[in-house]
Image (tube, rainbow, N blue to C red):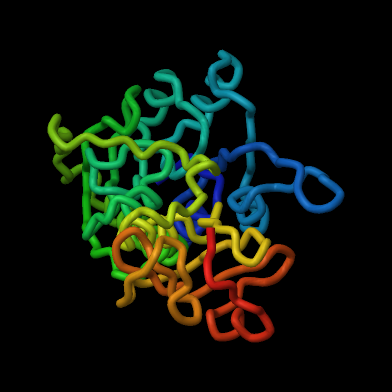
Amino acid sequence: MRLVFTGSPDFSVPVLEALVEAGHDIAAVYCQPPRPAGRGKKDRPGPVHARALELGLEVRHPVSLKGAEEQADFADLNADAAVVVAYGLILPQAILDAPTHGCLNIHASLLPRWRGAAPIHRAIMAGDAETGICIMQMEAGLDTGPVLLREATPIGAEEITALLHDRLAAMGSRMIVDALARLDDLTPEVQAEDGVTYAAKIDKAEARVDWTKPAAEVDRLIRGLSPFPGAKCDMAGEQVKLLASRLADGNGAPGQVLDGLTIACGEGAVQILRAQRPGKRAMEAEDFLRGFDMPDHVA
């Protein structure tokens, strides 16, 4: 098929690669414009932009798709379909209508649960037992379109967002290739009105650990915010980023260090498995504790 691909971050890259490998004709790749990055704050292409250039594909990065000129340029590609995955721009109706088969979105949740910007983080933070991928026919509403394909996967007891992100990206890559191959035979499933939840964008203010919360909630916060922005706490005068954890036995005052990196919560305790001090690399617990004088209490 002749496709337009729209996506921007790391999550989208395996999908683009899978479409190319499957032999689809990528008419153009749309992604977010380069952003200032690094010490020199020079504009740097995002992950999809960089990979598309490596693959020899045409890259477009308009600031908006609301203008008549941008919409005409998109329509002139004469695409059979557009594949959308974590693009980051709102697609106006004229864009949604331009390809013959419309725009297909790869969404990392079991819709209608976790519509919106951060479905992977929110699923872990909420303690969901499973999540998945939906291939959705896009319409004007926020992730409201009918679902063409869905597949569930369990969330591991110690799984962090980074690992689940990579698993779901691989699932989405496989599923969109399958969906495109069977597009005429798929029956759109209208989303249920019950069970709608919204995955709001992660706010850095959420990253501060509240040790008075139950251990299960603290553990989910740590795993859900890893690696970015990373749950944070004050430890021996430093703001330490907590990147992996598990539930642990033990009780004590909230924030009390029980043993090594096992810390008491309002109910139960969590064991920190990976952490990062300011200006240092992320380390497994054993390496972190080597040469670090753990306090009796963290905040």
Query: 247 or 19, which is in the foreground?
Result: 247
Residue under the image location 39 percent in, 26 percent down = 96
Is 234 rendered above or below residue 115?
Answer: below
Query: 170 or 129, which is in the foreground?
Result: 129
Asked whether residue 130 appears in the rendered view, the answer is yes
Is 60 rendered above or below residue 208?
Answer: above
Q: Position of residue 163 (x, y in %)?
A: 43, 66
Asked whether residue 5 appears in the rendered view, the answer is no
Residue under the image location 59 percent in, 72 percent down = 295
Q: Position of residue 233 (x, y in %)?
A: 55, 58
| Location of residue 223 (image quadrant) | bottom left
Residue under the image location 39 percent in, 67 percent down = 264
How many numbered circles are shown? 0
| Location of residue 275 (image quadrant) | bottom right
Q: Residue furthest top?
A: 68
| Location of residue 265 (image quadrant) | bottom left
Residue under the image location 51 percent in, 44 percent down = 7
Q: Is residue 71 left or right of residue 53?
A: left
Q: Position of residue 245 (x, y in %)?
A: 42, 70
Q: Is residue 113 left or right of residue 206?
A: left
Query: 55 or 220, which is in the foreground?
Result: 220
Is 38 rendered above or below residue 260?
Answer: above
Query: 42 or 222, which is in the foreground?
Result: 222
